[in-house]
Image (cartoon, helix red, strand yellow):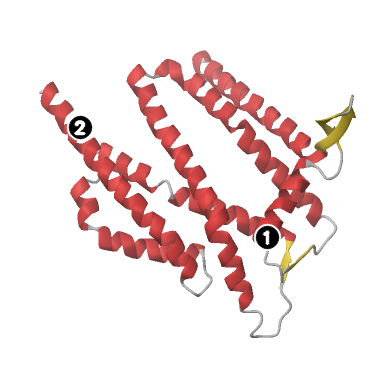
Amino acid sequence: MIPNSYLKEIRLFIKNFTEWILLLLIFTTFFFSFGIREIIIFGKALYFPFPQNPSFATEIFNFITSDLIPESVTLIVTNPLTAFIVQVKIALLLSFVVTLPFLLYRLIKYFSPALYVKEKISIIKVVVPSAILFILGTIFSYFVLIPPTFSILYSYTEGINASPFFTVNEFIGLVVSLLFATGLMFLLPVCMILLTRFGIVSPHIWQEQWRYALLFFLIVSAIITPDGSGVTMLLLSVPMVGLYGIGYIFSKKVSLDSRKIGIRNS
């Protein structure tokens, strides 16, 4: 038998999570079905959301394709469901971004009774920089990494006299994968600081092993951006080296602070 206290906690957690899922579905439906319509009232143009096509998801898709698809490449669909599914995916992604603060708020509120004030502050110190670095990584990928990747890869079609096409589903999947992968890589300083904070890796290890870290960055960058030219690999490796340096500096600071606290306690 499961104790009643555990059952109560499980129900509370499911309730919080269910509320977020419901909100996620509502916003997904909104972004998929609604778009902005201009209405003239007393000679002034006002904009309101209305059920229409193009929807928010469609507009975002068109915006992404205009930014990232090379001019010589034709975007195609291979079955009747592809366009529908892609718009649902974009609407779901937009909904996830919009409702993520609510999810984090619910999770923090759920766990906060069991945390001390210092632990709550520590969580904020980790979550906020992680969110900022992840967003910066996705922005870097969108504007700097993805456009040359597609351009370089499609340049190889000229050598084999092939027509450059790109399926809608593969395009969205590749874009989202690159954005997500680059965002995760930009979390490097946070990972380094946490490893040092928990005493797993000391700062001088980061300093001594920088050559291996550089090699690792080049390998991972080559895997994420397999264009064969090495250009995008270097584009991604350069900021990773900078982030590695930032991680080392703050890891050293965290190590010194931990030593001072240890001396005071002793």
**Helix, strand or loop at mark 2:** helix
> Horizontal placement of 171 versus 37: left or right?
left
Verify CB contact (< 8 Å) between mark 1 and mark 2. no
Dot 2 corresponds to which residue? 258
Q: Earlier in the sequence, mark 1 or mark 2?
A: 1
Is residue 222 something one can see in this rendering? no
- Above or below residue 208? Residue 159 is below
Residue under the image location 20 percent in, 32 percent down: 258
Quadrant where the C terminus lies? top left
Residue 237 or 201: which is nearer the viewer?
237
Residue 238 or 221: which is nearer the viewer?
238
Residue 152: quarter of image: bottom right
Residue under the image location 39 percent in, 60 percent down: 238
Residue 86 % position (x, y): 74, 51
Residues packed near mark 2 inside 10 Å, few (<14), some (14 to 19) or many (20 plus): some
Is residue 29 something one can see in this rendering? yes
Residue 171: mark: 1
Residue 70: quarter of image: bottom right
Residue 240 % position (x, y): 39, 55
Residue under the image location 80 percent in, 62 percent down: 77
Residues packed near mark 1 inside 10 Å, few (<14), some (14 to 19) or many (20 plus): some
> Horizontal placement of 173 versus 130: left or right?
right
**Residue type of the residue flagged with mark 1:** Phe
- Above or below residue 33? Residue 137 is below
**Helix, strand or loop at mark 1:** helix
Residue 102: quarter of image: top right
Q: In this figure, what is the number of numbered marks?
A: 2
**Residue type of the residue flagged with mark 2:** Ser
Residue under the image location 40 percent in, 61 percent down: 237
